[in-house]
Image (tube, helix red, strand yellow):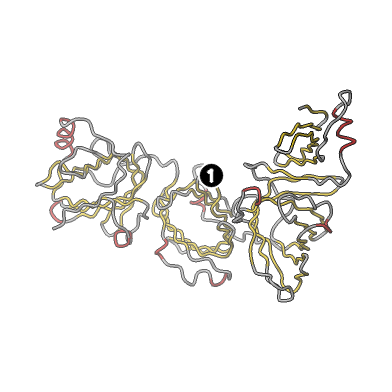
Amino acid sequence: MNQHNHHYLFHLNSGSGSCYRCVAFFPVHKNVLQFKQTRCIQSFADSENIGSVCRRSFRGDAPMTTLFRANASSERCPFEAPFNFTYFFIDGSCTSRISTVTACASPHRFRFQYQACPEVPHTETHADEVECIAKWNSFGVEYFAVKLTNSFAPSHSARFRCIIHERASSGGRMGISADASCSELTDMSFASTVLNYKQDSAVTARCHFPPFLVHDHHSDAPRIWKSIVTDHTHRFSKDEWIEQWEGLNRSVSLCVDEENLGSAHRLIVHAVHGCSSGYQCIKFLKRKRNIVDMVRGKMSSNEFEACEHLRSETVETLLLEGSKPLKCPVKGRHSRSDCPNAAVHFGCRVDHSIQLRPYCNSNETQEMVCLGHWTEDDVHYVIAEESITKKRFCYVYSSLASGAARIRSFRHAACHPQTPQRSTPQYDFSASRLDECEPMTSAWERNGASINVASFSIFVFFSFWR
């Protein structure tokens, strides 16, 4: 009905009748709103203002209710990880096992790993992954709010918790509310669970990533790489590596050991993938200035065992973002005599262009540009980008006798010698002849403008092999 100094008077109608209720709101943070409300007020004098109605109607024991913004953005937490803790709650104390808190790859997100304790019945080892959304002070007491990101709670509101925080020289205490109402959390003694924590030493970088990953020797601008396998972006600084997908961190790694193998570099990193952490062996092989092969080992809890099982099955190809079109490694039109309409053109319209027309009875043409290539054992590996969709492909070009060639294109696969044996090509084109560009180019132009097939969503595998 009306409001006065954060006090609001509401008129409520229900099947059992109507009444008035006074509500006092306390905006403690942009993501957190607290309020108290009175019991039903049956009536009040017309001359009485809202302030006086609310003052006489509020009881000293009126509970405080907490509301959280549904789409709350994350904020910096008032603590630093890693740290270890013991905990106690209504069923008893768990001090015989050490639990831990570690940082996740996403900023402001942490994993609380609780260890089961034999002295407390019904305790189980479990993890809570939390994201901080607010911090505030009330009468000299520090509070912060978190959202449980790995919770299977039946409602969105049940995922929130309030935490009361006391700092000490090398750690502190945290008191966690039992639910999202936070109504009981006026003092540490009323917390559902209390953690006594001590700060741990964080892993620090002890080496540097290879300079060709970090920046160009002609410029100090940082390099950004993109995997043609996953489409994830990779950003390297001197000693830190961040992998992202759609702007969100997938992993954060620190360089802890590096070995220059000449043509390649082998590193051990301390990696945080999501909210799991450990040591990982990584091998980088520079193919060209803008092309790098990367092999990742399995996560290990032991730094010195990380490189024991490094296998090339996990190879990815990274392409430098901002790579400019460059001349393709071959030139000409590749076709089959009994199906001249189906052809692959390399460097015909311009020296960096590829036109793929895979069907005998269709004029649909896929337009590509060469962004990088390298050669091994007379096989060309070409990274090409579709002109409109910007999707990236690996073309594997194998020369055969008398101008014949086998041309295979792969999507979401590494540009690597082992790829043809491990992945199914999107297109597998066996050309029996190689001709100059002009005749086929002219023929295509006489048949009409090419049709881009960026929206063609069905993967087609075809082969002229007999």
Residue that protrudes farthest toward the front in the picture? 16
Q: Is residue 355 left or right of residue 288?
A: left
Q: Which sits in the foreground, 2 or 173?
A: 2
**Viewer-proximal residue among 181 and 203:** 181
Q: Quadrant of the C terminus?
A: bottom left
- In this rendering, the answer to whether 46 lies above or below 370 is above
In depth, the one of 450 and 50 nearer the eye is 50
Element type at mark 1? loop
Residue drawn 22% across and 43% down? 331
| Above or below, 131 relative to 173 | above
Furthest residue to the top?
47
Residue type, label 1? Gly
Give the class, few, some or many, for how many residues have Cα within 10 Å of label 1's Cα (few <14, many ≥20).
few
State the residue lying farthest toward the bottom.
118
Q: For the point 80% across and 32% down, which residue is it?
A: 6
Residue named by callout 1 = 247
Find residue 344 and report its image quarter.
top left
Estimate the x, y position of residue 119 in percent, counting from the top left: 74, 76
Query: Looking at the picture, does residue 202 appear above or below residue 1?
Result: below
Q: Position of residue 153 (x, y in %)?
A: 61, 54
